Image (tube, rainbow, N blue to C red):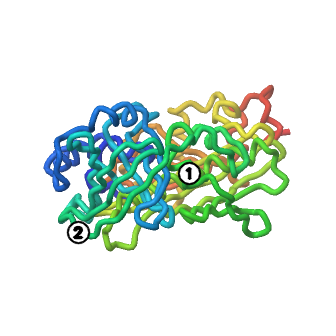
Amino acid sequence: MKPLSMKPLSLTRCRSLAFLLCAGLASGAAAQDQELKACGGAAGAPAWAAATIKSGGIYRGTVGSLPVALQLGAGADGVGGEARYYYERKGINIELTPFRSGESLILQEEVWTGPMEGLVVTGCLTLSRTAAGLTGIWAKSNGLGKLPVRLSPMNVLGMALKLPPSPGLLKLKTADPLAFLKLNHAWTAQAGGKSVREPLSGIVYPRVLGASAALNAALQDQQLGHAVSALDCESMLGSSDMDEGYDLNAAITYTSAKLVSLREDAGYYCGGAHPDNFSVGVMLDRATGRAVSLSAIWPKLTAARQKTLYLAHLPTEVDAECRDVLPEMGSEFTFHLTPAGLNLTPTSLPHVVGACAETAVLPFASLKADANPQGAYYREFYR
């Protein structure tokens, strides 16, 4: 694993990328945002827009002839004061900072252009309220290139689902309605139904042939989370000319009558000096789609015992330097199953030794004493 390094961004802007360490990056962005004021007006929004900004109202319409969707304020996550929009043909969020001039709402369009220039104002939307929604103009910060803007309010909560219903999709509808609008469309089955591709983000995720509706919903939600992260990552790259972003390799590693397990390996560069990556193990109940904890199968496999067994089963190719480092690590692992056994991968290593996060395989037979003979999954492994 490589150390995390990203461009500065506010806490609100990184809300969908749960795996990123956003808190340490917020202060630089806040200071820089305060220096940007290219569209005129005073800080804040006119009174008529304040309630909409607080609730995160959603609008759809056009800038010139191009379809767009806009969220006026952060909304459901409880963070007000920001806005964002995207052009539907690209699906990439553009951040907007509100200002006011009399009764006009000015939304300053800000795009990340890389670590050298940072955030740059790329346009100004000047909007007025009408009975039908919002109207106004988009223009460059110098006042040139004016385009008409027409936006109508949307009832996202009332929209029909274009994907099978799943807990994650329903949550996204309220928590991040712009992401819901981007991803609520038909996805593409591949390889005879063994995988599905989300077209806008390009994220591909495996499926289990003959799976229950609940398991399919769980796999869809796993993919949904990565698709949101991929689109957010691309938004944070802004106009950077680096051909980077978010890549996922997910594979089914184990199936049995009651269980399915996967491993997800993601690599991403969302701006900054260096890319990063992470691995996550997934284990699901085939009937219910619910996540299965390690303790549901091996209740005696405590964190301390996991570490002891991990160190005892390190792959032979692990070098001496890593063998010196790994005993000092914490006892936090992600896990997945393969026919060879339980796979443990460290998740608590410091960035500087992230490359030592090798996966160790604990044979099922060696864990029989840690298992619960009365557990629902015992006979998946032991007779």
Location of the N terminus (image quadrant):
bottom left
Location of residue 285 with respect to 277 vertically, above or below: above
Label 2 environment density (alpha carbons within 10 Å; few <14, some 14–19, many ≥20): few
The front one of 275 and 63 is: 63
> Hey, which residue is sitting farthest top in the picture?
374
Callout 2 secondary element? loop
Q: Which residue is drawn at the image coordinates 45% and 41% (left, top)? A: 131
Residue, disc 1: 181
Mark 2 and mark 1: span between their CA atoms? Answer: 31 Å
Q: Residue 210: give its label.
A: none
Count of marks overlaid on the render: 2
- Residue 256: x percent and y percent? 80, 48
Residue, disc 2: 144
The front one of 132 and 204 is: 132
The front one of 266 and 142 is: 142
Q: Which residue is drawn at the image coordinates 32% and 58% (left, top)? A: 137
Callout 1 secondary element? helix
In the displayed structure image, the side of residue 118 where residue 257 appears, left or right? right
